[in-house]
Amino acid sequence: MIAGAVRGRWRLPAWASDAGAAAVVLAAELGLASYGLGARVVLLAVAGAGLMLLRRRYPASVAVVAGVLYLIGTQPPEYDAPVSSALIALYGVGRHASGRMAIGIGALAVVVGAVRSGAGWEGASLASVLTVGLSPAAPVAAGHIVRLRAELLHRRQQQAAELAVREERRRIARELHDVIAHHVSVMSLYMGVARRTIPLDPGRAEETLRTGEDTARQAMAEMRHLLDVLRTDGEPVDDQADVGVARLPGLVEESGNATLEVAGEAVELPTTVDHAVYRIVQEALTNTRKHAAGARSRVLLTYQPGLVEVEVGDDGQPRPGDVGVGLGLAGMAERVSLCGGELRAGPSPRGGFVVHARIPLVERP
């Protein structure tokens, strides 16, 4: 789900692209018919357009059938060969088929093209025959190049997402430093007070020890949400004083075009959850400003028994060239997962983009 959102926020769906290719083939074959719209021309055009709807799932089979339709269309009497469907089908082989399959189909198309060119061009030069004969390899090569570039881009996005997750873990570890340091110092203080008051007031010393025990349990509860978090040695500890639900009104106001709604009875959140809610809202508002400038955002914070939910939605519209959301979503998902919660993000059916997190609260002793 998150990967899907990271891959592309406003990418054209596959079915829409295939439908567009079918419409192009149908319009091209019927519009370029120089011998009139006979039954054979119409049937070949419709068949070629229909193949475009299957070119992703069965690229090799579609290319072979498109080639057969092309050969049928080139037979006398007067004809209009369905070239567009054959070219798009060959491109689909390079784009969606395996490397070996693409090479095989491309070689077969070149052989057929060379034989037809040699048979129909009596007296033509060898260079002319080779140029026409090798032309079917061009769309296959173009599709394969596009495929390689897409795979390279996907690999880079995966590496960048992994880097974002590592950076998020480092930031969580820096926050953990402050949380644990505070609890340990408090426990040390209570232990010292209890040690000095045991001879004078055993009852008060017992109460102090119980408070210290509660503090230790609270610290362990915080740490359970941050297992497997690694911290880089020597990294400076950032100041996290301004991070938390209490800072949400100021964060929303700073965004300039957002509203904040709070539902349910507010409770004190564990530090990790408190920071996670703030970071989710911060990253979501940043993504809105980056990818849908001028859009309005709505932040909804809901307190429920045993959990807290936060939702950030906008009414933005896609911008030309906007193909991604930003790698902050990977960090958000990692942070929420470490808190034992779940994150959903993606386009909203009503338009815009929605980020929704559901995080359980730590059970206090």
Image (cartoon, rainbow, N blue to C red):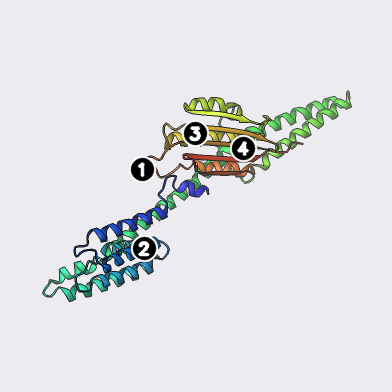
Secondary structure at numbered mark 2: helix
Label 4 SS: strand
Residue 262, visible in the rendered structure: yes
Q: Is residue 222 above or below residue 241?
A: below
Residue neighbourhood size for the residue with mark 4, other residues' Cα within 10 Å, grouped as few (<14), some (14–19), many (≥20): some
Residue under numbered circle 1: 321
Task: Kindly indicate the quadrant of the structure image that contains residue 225.
Answer: top right
- Please identify, in this view, whether the residue under mark 3 or under mark 2 is nearer the observer: 2
* Dot 1 or dot 3, earlier in sequence: 3
Distance of mark 3 from mark 2, alpha carbons?
43 Å
Q: Relative to 361, is 345 on the left or the right? A: left
Please, which residue is most extreme toward the top here?
200
Q: Residue at the location (38% across, 69% down)? A: 61
Total labels: the figure holds 4
Q: Residues within 10 Å of mark 2 (few under 14, many from 20)?
A: many
The spot of residue 237 in percent (x, y) is 57, 33
Which amino acid, by three-letter code, is at mark 1?
Answer: Gly
Within 10 Å of disc 3 (Cα), the crowding (few <14, some 14-19, many 20+) is many
| Left or right of residue 304, residue 106 in this image | left
Cα–Cα gap, marks 4 and 2: 46 Å
- To which residue does mark 4 refer? 309
**Secondary structure category for the residue under label 3:** helix
- Mark 2 = which residue? 50
Q: Which residue is mark 3?
A: 285
